[in-house]
């Protein structure tokens, strides 16, 4: 299941996100979205977890968590239709 993590403080790292999500189960990937020009975080990320049950627990457990002083938003990512 692909999960969208928003409202991240710009200093949050992929390693920190991995640590948070690993508490709930296996993490296939974690991608912090970076600005192509500056290389700095855009304040959101995508996390991929293989098991729906673990992903749902992660979403419920981490949504509104305060990380680096910001309340993060965590939800299932909308799947884009394939062209």
Image (cartoon, rainbow, N blue to C red):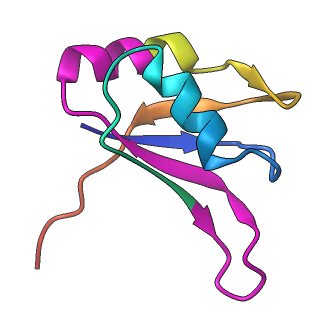
Judge left or right: residue 78 versus residue 71: left
- Viewer-proximal residue, 48 or 5? 48
Residue furthest out toward the right: 69
Judge left or right: residue 80 versus residue 22: left
Residue furthest out toward the bottom: 37
Name the residue located 72 percent from the left edge and 62 percent from the top edge.
41
Residue 37 is covered by the magenta coloring: yes
Residue 10 x/y as whole percent: 80, 53
Image quadrant containing the N terminus: top left
Name the residue located 56 percent from the left edge and 18 percent from the top edge.
62
Q: Which residues are magenta?
A: 33-59
Quadrant housing residue 49: top left
Quadrant housing residue 65: top right
> 35 above or below 56?
below
> 35 above or below 9?
below
Residue 60 is covered by the magenta coloring: no
Quadrant housing residue 58: top left
Residue 18 x/y as whole percent: 52, 35
Judge left or right: residue 77 versus residue 9: left
> 66 above or below 17?
above
Total numbered labels placed on residues in the image? 0
Judge left or right: residue 62 versus residue 76: right
Residue 74 x/y as whole percent: 52, 31
Residue furthest out toward the left: 83
Residue 7 x/y as whole percent: 70, 42
Name the residue located 82 percent from the left edge and 50 percent from the top edge.
11
Image quadrant containing the C terminus: bottom left
């Amino acid at each position: 299941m692909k999960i969208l993590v928003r409202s991240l403080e710009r200093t949050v790292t992929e390693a920190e996100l991995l640590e948070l999500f690993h508490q709930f189960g296996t993490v296939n990937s974690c991608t912090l979205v970076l600005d192509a020009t500056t290389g700095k975080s855009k304040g959101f990320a995508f996390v991929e977890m293989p098991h729906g049950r673990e992903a749902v627990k992660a979403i419920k457990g981490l949504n509104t968590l305060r990380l680096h002083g910001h309340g993060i938003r965590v939800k299932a990512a909308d799947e884009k239709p394939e062209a």
